[in-house]
Amino acid sequence: MAREQPLPERVTLLGIRHHGPGSARMVAAALEAVRPEVVLIEGPPEGDALLPHVPDLTPPVALLLHDEAEPARAAFWPFAEFSPEWRAMKWAHANGVPVRFFDLPAAASLAEPSDSPDSPDAPGDEPGDEPGGESGGECGGECGGDEPKAALDPLGTLAEAAGFDDPERWWEDVVEHHTDPEDLAEAVAEAMGALREEFADQVDARTLRREAAMRQNVRQALKDVEGPIAVVAGAWHVPALRTLPPASVDAAALKGLPRKKISGTWVPWSHGRLASASGYGAGIASPGWYAHLWECAERGDAVPRWFARACAVLRAEDLPASTASAVEAVRLADALAAMRGRPSPGLSEVMEASLAVLCGGDATPLRLVHEQLVVGERLGEVGDDVPTSPLAADLARLRKRLRLPVSAMAKPIRLDLRKDTDRERSKLLRRLEVLDVPWGTPDTTRTLGTFAEAWQLHWKPEFEVALAVAARHGTTVEAAARTVLVTGAGDARRVVDAAESLSRSVGCEIPEAVAAARQALDRCAAAATDALELLAALPDLATTVRYGSVRGTDPELLRVALHGLLARGAVGLPLACRGVDEDTAERAVRAVEGADDAVRLAADEEHRETWQRALKSLVAMPDAHGLPTGRATRLLWETGAIDSDEVAARLHRAVSLAAGATAFVAGFVRGSASLLTADSRLFGVVDEWLTGLSGADFAAALPLLRRAVGEFSPAERRMLGDRVKGTAAGGAAGGAAASSEWDEELAARLAGHVRELLAAGT
């Protein structure tokens, strides 16, 4: 029986920690010393075709591979400037040396179910994630999964053995501040070998399969070249590559791997997405700090330059940060490192000195330094010659023409739809939203009028996967959005869905989609029998009517549809509120509120009167649920359709009945508190009812009342509180002069009720 053979001496194994500057320096030095004829890098072989584009990339970037048949099954392999794999690629291209990926094929990884323990490069999928297991694979679309963290943390185990309670700090001391990288590879390999021997039973099946693929690719490289070979792999895998079992053993382990057609490209990445806090299993805690260490490695002035940058960040926010403070911070960091026996200040010393000297002990500005410098949001770039899908190419062309820069941080923009460029930008953002690429998010907190829009732009790398998925709908953004909208309109089965489809189609300014959505609205409305469903579609439709002319759509055609839905919904509203349960009553309230807003926004005078007649019929319905009835009463009062005397009479009538009183009052007080507090008579009726409730009745009424009051603005709540205080003191509602006398009876009732609530809580 054939035995394992030692790896030939001409193969140099470089065990690395992914995204580690110390490992990157080690790889660069080793490659210069070995001068290999081929470089093997941990990663999917399907990415080999994209390696010639490395000179056109500015990291951080990521290799994106996806299944052509199911583009949503995709994965990323990110690289930073300080990633050892990236340094190996750059060295190989600079020296004209062939470079290959030699891990398990992406076709096998992407074929694995998302809930499987073998999910491709999922965050935290194996022990090697920390000191160099996975090649940085981060799943997108459906291929990912929240995989359980392996029981063994190699980095943490080694740190604990060295007497460190923080693995990151240990790695910094022994690697990132290591001045002689030549012996680092062997030291890391020996440590990993000891761990693999000690914890052999914790190596999962997928890791063993990956290592079988790696060995097969090493064998192929040994056949292809006669000279030195350099292998850059996660340190966790190095012990498994030091010997070669019979090729038949590895071939058997790889038998039956699925074969799929894989496509890919390079995409921009960001430091924030490299951070472990983003959920990336092979990530690091401080990519911005590591980038700084890499940039300053040759100059040897990392700490002084760090504090200079920190001062610049603080001054940009109008916070005091002088040069003298930076000098003092450097001294403090050096002193802390010396006291702790560290070779030089690490991130912990730098941040402690920043907190004490630059931030004056205030953690708030320190968070700013952490976000911008420790993590950072540097965004990489991809050259124009990198292959991509026609849809992604069309988007890149539109971004360039419309001058919409891609940013890894949220950026607010304001658009004036009367300007051609801004209108085109709005159309693009809305069409991308239809394609599930929400690059822009409408800022609904700012009301700018009919001709203006506010957006928050924030590009995320996973949008590249969404573009790959959307590419099946068309080769341009407009064509793909048209397909999605027309298909969605044809699939609409409810009036509200058809109205939403119409609204999106008008916003995207695609005439074919508008026509399809309009037909869908007529079809769904003709089949609908639920008045609440008809009314629920009005808000979207009213907004569409209002903005129709701005978007090049005849608003009168849309208004006809709105009036038709309103007329049918108004007729059926009173009956739809009779004898209903609490959930249906809440749905009815939302429908009434939305329809009332829509009528005020877009209906003509005739249909406004139709709506008011419907509200009056609801109010007069004796067995209608109190929640929509109270809300309708409030709306009629606000528009002047009924006066305060009539409202007071209805309130008195409602509160005199035990059943439905709470629901009616809760419906009535919903909305704004300003009109309620301004009318002392109505306020007095509600106050008299509320203060007259027993403890049990008050507890039963509390959920509905809290929901109603919860919609008030903070200013309205303060105003209502002041009014209640004035009433309790014998003020406005009671008509008597304010009194400072303590109401013993009222206080006793309140104290007793509080005790009951506390007792119930325990």
Image (cartoon, rainbow, N blue to C red):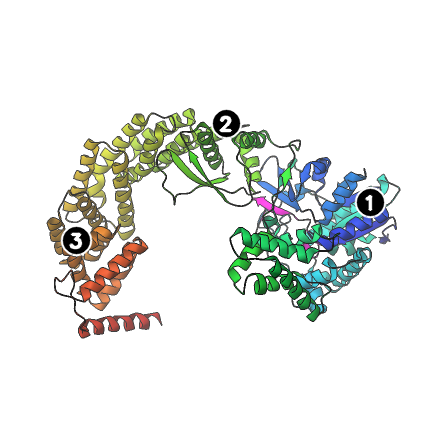
Image x and y of residue 43, in percent: 71, 45
Q: Nearer the viewer, residue 143 or 545?
A: 545
- SS at badge 1: helix
Quadrant in the picture for the C terminus: bottom left
Residue count near mark 2 (Cα–Cα under 10 Å), binned few <14, some 14–19, many ≥20: some
- Mark 2 — residue? 479
User: Along the horizontal axis of the image, is 199 left or right of 727?
Assistant: right
- SS at badge 3: loop
- Which residues lie in the magenta part? 125-146
- Mark 1 — residue? 219
Q: CA distance from mark 2 to mark 1?
A: 48 Å
User: Along the horizontal axis of the image, is 433 left or right of 573?
Assistant: right
Q: CA distance from mark 3 to mark 1?
A: 88 Å
Task: Tell me, yes or no, whether the two marked residues, 2 and 3, touch with CB atoms within 8 Å.
Answer: no
Q: Amino acid at mark 1?
A: Arg
User: Along the horizontal axis of the image, is 715 left or right of 437?
Assistant: left
Image x and y of residue 171, in percent: 70, 61
Q: Is residue 369 above or below residue 270?
A: below
Residue 141 highlighted magenta (yes or no): yes
Residue count near mark 3 (Cα–Cα under 10 Å), binned few <14, some 14–19, many ≥20: few
- Mark 3 — residue? 679
Q: Earlier in the sequence, mark 2 or mark 1?
A: 1
Q: Earlier in the sequence, mark 2 or mark 3?
A: 2
Image x and y of residue 500, in percent: 37, 36
Q: Is residue 447 above or below residue 478?
A: below
Task: Tell me, yes or no, whether the two marked residues, 3 and 1, touch with CB atoms within 8 Å.
Answer: no
Q: Amino acid at mark 2?
A: Ala
Q: Residue at x 22, y 39 (%)?
A: 572
Q: Amino acid at mark 3?
A: Asp
Marks 3, 1: nearer the viewer:
3
